[in-house]
């Protein structure tokens, strides 16, 4: 796979060196979409970049199929990062264009993509409906491989609903097609799905047998990523059997392969699993190292489901270590992110509604057949009983959660006040170092806070940006006083010394436990959108949004305040600089929000 990707990238590089017109331009669009579909799991942000390039080029060429493929690729990229509502927007655009063009394979594939999104949101009935639409079209055009793929997808939904008999029915239909067509890659996938099914049934030996069949085919095909996934699945079986050392060995082998491939999504997932096993073995330091690595990667590449799983594992880890404050903090992050991803009711509510929906459907069937089916009536009654039990259990859990939340909230409030006091004290210490910038951090913090509000951030992130802004220049503590207050131009060496302050600030605070990513944002607050900043030359979305906001607020405040080495440029010049460099040095969304606050809402730093 890596050889194939390298070859495709070389072709793309050659195409980019020629004017994109006619057949050459369309071929470049097709290649961008092909590359993106290969990379969307391991490099979702890179996939999004390919998708944007494809969309822009398709529109300029009037290439409608390329535009549809680009929108579908955008949907896939957002779905891989848990941005389900964004992905649905792009899928619907793609579906509309495919329909206009009469492009049946594109329509069917998009139906399948939408079904995956609904399945990820636990909206199972809608998911099955979309996969059945895809199946009907693939049967119409007699695409046997995609027929098998749709059957597998429907089986996955039934398995997630714990209807294992129906899942097995669809899995076996897909398996027979794969055997008839000789599609070894698809056959390996079918064996893998059967392994998961039997694991859910509790038949671990049969599950292990299917996993080993899948592994054998993937080894024959040289499918390294597939081998890695199967190692991980076998590790799950061994973990179920409490054979933790063997489970560790398989998951370490899996991790080694995806590290070689540079597949960051699966690196993150493997580290999360290894962290879980370490918790079970009470190896808490090693567990923490794996989980923190998983969290760093998932946060950077935007795989939000893995990120939320990491928060839950970290909550379990700290609970096992009797550190309930941290356990509660990470559980809050897990709950907040999960709610943001799904924007649906709680899992208990979804389960109850699902049972109610199925109960109503069964009742209608029972009325249709004049209640002759005794087994059906018994199932209805059982479902009603389960629903009532779920309601009672939810009420009990809600009461317990309220009591525990109240206790933990009091502890969190005390901790929060202590942290805020520490931040304020640090801010005053920093400003006492340089009297010429007195009040600088406070003003930057206030403007950054308003920008975050304008951009629609939640209260927790707004508070984080405000607090981090108060200490963003903490690294200047180590800069000599005579350099900070010098009225003349600094030498090149002195400028290099000043540029060390983000790294110094990071070093000072990296080992301090804050409820926000203080040290990381401080390290990045001098990075610029086009990569020309320092210390690491990050660009675009590589820079944390908090740092991008502080960078804009910092420039505005600096240009409207007195400095010993220059006169005050003023607010009009500051707005001009921000506007001209929007999308170049500064995040365009942040720049737009800042200009709106000052020019339309009348905010004044004075």
Image: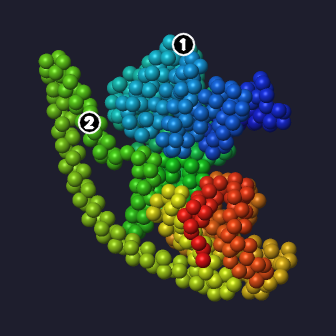
Answer whether residue 279 is visible to the viewer in this image. Answer: no
Q: Residue at x 38, y 33 (%)?
A: 124
- Label 2 neighbourhood size at 10 Å, few (<14), some (14-19), many (20+)? some
Work out whether 413 lies above or below 193. Answer: below
Residue 557 x, y percent position in the rendering: 65, 72
For the N terminus, the image quarter is: top right
Residue lying at 71% horizontally and 80% vertically, measured from the top left? 562
Q: Nearer the viewer, residue 384 or 578?
A: 578
Q: Residue at x 54, y 26 (%)?
A: 96
31 up-or-down from 395: above or below: above
Question: Tag 1, which secondary structure?
Answer: loop
Residue 337 showing in the rendered view: yes
Residue found at x 34% / y 48%: 346
Snapshot quadrant of residue 580:
bottom right
Residue 534 located left or right of residue 442: right
Quadrant of residue 440 in the image?
bottom right
> Label 1: few (<14), some or many (≥20) within 10 Å?
few
Label 2 or label 1, whichever comes before in sequence order = 1
Residue 301's label in the rendered image is: none
x and y percentages locating residue 182 in the rendered image: 58, 16
Q: How is the image coloured?
A: rainbow
Secondary structure category for the residue under label 2: helix
Q: Label 2 vs label 1: CA separation? A: 36 Å
On screen, residue 550 versus residue 564, left or right, reads left
Q: Position of residue 272 (x, y in %)?
A: 51, 51
Task: Return the residue nearer the eye: 484 or 376.
Answer: 484
Quadrant holding the C terminus: bottom right
Quadrant for residue 587, please give it. bottom right
Image coords of residue 522 (percent x, y): 63, 69
Residue 333 versus residue 124 in the image, above or below: below
Residue, disc 2: 355
Query: Which residue carries the number 1 mark?
Result: 141
């Amino acid at each position: 796979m890596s050889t194939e990707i390298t070859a495709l990238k070389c072709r793309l590089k050659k195409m980019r060196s020629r004017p994109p017109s006619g057949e050459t331009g369309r071929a470049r669009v097709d290649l961008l979409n092909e590359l993106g579909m290969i990379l969307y799991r391991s490099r979702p942000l890179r996939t999004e970049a390919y998708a944007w390039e494809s969309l822009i080029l398709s529109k300029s060429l009037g290439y409608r199929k390329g535009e549809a493929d680009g929108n579908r690729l955008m949907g896939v990229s957002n779905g891989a990062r848990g941005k389900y509502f964004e992905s649905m927007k792009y899928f619907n655009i793609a579906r509309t264009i495919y329909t206009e063009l009469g492009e049946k394979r594109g329509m069917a594939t998009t139906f399948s993509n939408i079904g995956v999104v609904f399945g990820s949101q636990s909206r199972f009935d809608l998911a099955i409906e979309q996969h059945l639409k895809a199946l009907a079209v693939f049967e119409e055009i007699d695409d046997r491989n995609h027929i098998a793929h749709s059957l597998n997808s429907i089986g996955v939904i039934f398995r997630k609903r714990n209807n294992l008999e129906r899942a097995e029915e669809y899995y076996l239909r897909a398996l027979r097609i794969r055997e008839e067509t000789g599609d070894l890659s698809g056959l390996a996938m079918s064996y893998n799905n059967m392994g998961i099914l039997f694991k859910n049934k509790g038949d671990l030996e049969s599950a292990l047998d299917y996993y080993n069949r899948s592994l054998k085919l993937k080894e024959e095909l040289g499918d390294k990523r597939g081998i890695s996934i199967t190692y991980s699945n076998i590790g799950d079986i061994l973990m179920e059997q409490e054979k933790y050392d063997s489970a560790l060995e398989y998951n370490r082998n899996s991790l080694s392969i995806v590290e070689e491939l540079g597949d960051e999504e699966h690196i993150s997932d493997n580290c999360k699993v290894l962290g879980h096993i370490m918790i079970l073995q009470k190896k808490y330091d090693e567990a923490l190292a794996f989980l923190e690595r998983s969290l760093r990667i998932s946060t950077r590449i935007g795989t939000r489901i893995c990120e939320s799983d990491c928060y839950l594992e970290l909550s379990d880890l700290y609970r096992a270590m009797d550190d309930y404050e941290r356990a509660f903090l990470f559980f809050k992050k897990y709950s907040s992110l999960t709610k943001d991803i799904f924007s649906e009711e709680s899992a208990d509510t979804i389960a109850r509604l699902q049972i109610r929906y199925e109960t109503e459907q069964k009742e209608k069937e029972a009325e249709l057949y004049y209640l002759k089916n005794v087994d059906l009536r018994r199932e209805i009654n059982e479902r009603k009983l389960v629903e009532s039990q779920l309601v009672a259990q939810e009420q009990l859990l809600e009461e317990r959660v309220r009591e525990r939340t109240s206790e933990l909230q009091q502890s969190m409030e005390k901790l929060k006040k202590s942290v805020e006091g520490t931040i304020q004290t640090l801010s005053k210490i920093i400003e006492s170092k340089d009297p010429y910038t007195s009040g600088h951090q406070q003003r930057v913090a206030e403007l950054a806070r308003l920008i975050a509000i304008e951009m629609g951030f939640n209260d927790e992130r707004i508070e984080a940006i405000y607090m981090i802004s108060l200490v963003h220049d903490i690294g200047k503590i180590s800069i000599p006083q005579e350099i900070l207050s010098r009225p003349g131009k600094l030498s090149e060496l002195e400028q290099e010394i000043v540029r060390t302050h983000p790294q110094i600030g990071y070093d000072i605070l990296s080992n301090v436990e804050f409820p926000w990513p203080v040290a990381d944002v401080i390290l990045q607050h001098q990075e610029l959108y086009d990569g020309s900043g320092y210390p690491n030359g990050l660009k675009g979305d590589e820079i944390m949004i908090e740092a991008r906001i502080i960078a804009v607020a910092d420039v505005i405040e600096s240009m409207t305040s007195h400095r010993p080495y220059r006169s005050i440029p003023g607010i009009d010049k500051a707005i001009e600089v921000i506007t001209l460099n929007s999308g170049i040095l500064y995040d365009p969304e942040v720049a737009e929000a800042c200009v709106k606050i000052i020019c339309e809402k009348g905010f004044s730093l004075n």
